[in-house]
Amino acid sequence: MSQSVLVKKSGILIAFILFSFIFLGVIFSLTNDISVKAGSDFSYPSWLIISYVAGLSMIVLPCTLPLVFIIIPLSMGKGYKKGLTMALLFGAGLTTTITLYGFAVATLGKTTSLDQFSTIMFLIAGISGFIFGLSQLKLITLKMPSYSRTPKFIQNRGEYSKSYLMGVLLGNAGVGCPNPMFYWLLIYIAGSGSLEIGSSLGLVHGIGRAIPLILFSLLAILGINATKGLITNRIKIEKITGWMLIFIGSFLIINGLPGGHVWYESTIVHIGWNNLVSMIGLPVEFHIGEHIHQKMFNFVISPEIVPIIFSGLIVFPIAWYFVNKRRAKVTV
């Protein structure tokens, strides 16, 4: 690696770290009064960090990673100033969409009980994750949004407005991402019932999602191909994320089924996590307490059946994957 490339990468990394500290500090100072009025002064700072980190972590998931290959062609070959402006506008559009989702979830939290909302969110997240996982393992075909298939009213716009509207549109692609931290965040927003907290955490999360995309674009504008490793190891990355999403999706589906979360609260995973949080002194937001569950349906799955369903959700894709692999060898 040449000295100039190393200097550029180091400079961008340092700028990213400094921006993260400054950004979180500014958001906290601007919204602290709001959080105190909402009775959330003890947990809001922790949720700012969780929201930002959850946004950054989205870059490794299949619903956000493909956006790298959209934002780079969008901003390359336009010159430093124009290319960076277009990348920033794309990120601003994506952030706008996530902020609106935060606002909407807070509004919904005012009219829906937290237990009902969390159950629905777990089920939606689990099904999304499971489907994404099957897609990553090439067991099913799932078409992701692409730049070439955007609506004509966006395609016919100027370059700057097109970049922003593309971000707004493709911001929806990441909402179904089965990132547990994201759905954990949505459950907190719904529980707060505060439009200000919902919007501010949505804003922070959206910026967290946008920053890695903008950094990839900035590196490309500077002539550094940071996506080479992603392209070279794409199959390996897809397999790893596929199996990860199958497991996480199965776990979230179980928590969204009637009686599933009650079973989870009795497992060693739940109890061990809470003991670990208490031992190492993490903030109370990381502690997952037991609570009374409202019945959304007229039935509850037996605790003896739940682990069988969980095992089936994991074993079925494994068997399907190896059967497909064997058939592919026979065909060759």
Image: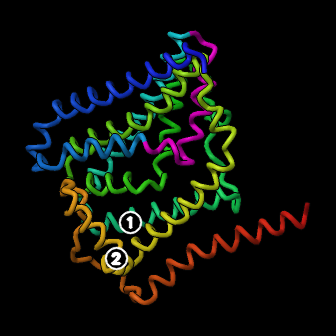
Disc number at residue 120?
1
* Looking at the image, residue 309 lies above or below residue 65: below
Q: Which residue is drawn at 13% across and 37% down?
A: 32
* Looking at the image, residue 208 lies above or below residue 61: above
Q: Position of residue 305 (x, y in %)?
A: 46, 88
Residue 325 relative to residue 13: left or right: right
Q: Name the residue under label 2.
A: 268
Is 76 covered by the magenta stretch? yes
Magenta span: 57-79
Q: In which quarter of the image is residue 70?
A: top right
User: Mark 1 Cα within 10 Å, few/some/many (few <14, many 20+)?
Assistant: some
Residue type, mark 2 in image: Ile
**Sequence-wise, which precedes: disc 1 or disc 2?**
1
Q: Position of residue 228 (x, y in %)?
A: 65, 32
Callout 1: helix, strand or loop?
A: helix
Q: Quadrant of residue 304?
A: bottom left
Callout 2: helix, strand or loop?
A: helix
Q: Where is residue 91 in the image (x, y as percent from the top left)?
A: 45, 29
Q: In which quarter of the image is residue 328?
A: bottom right
Q: In which quarter of the image is the N terminus?
A: top right
User: Mark 2 Cα within 10 Å, few/some/many (few <14, many 20+)?
Assistant: few
Q: Residue at x 16, y 31 (%)?
A: 29
Residue type, mark 1 in image: Ile
Helix, strand or loop for the magenta stretch, by majority = helix
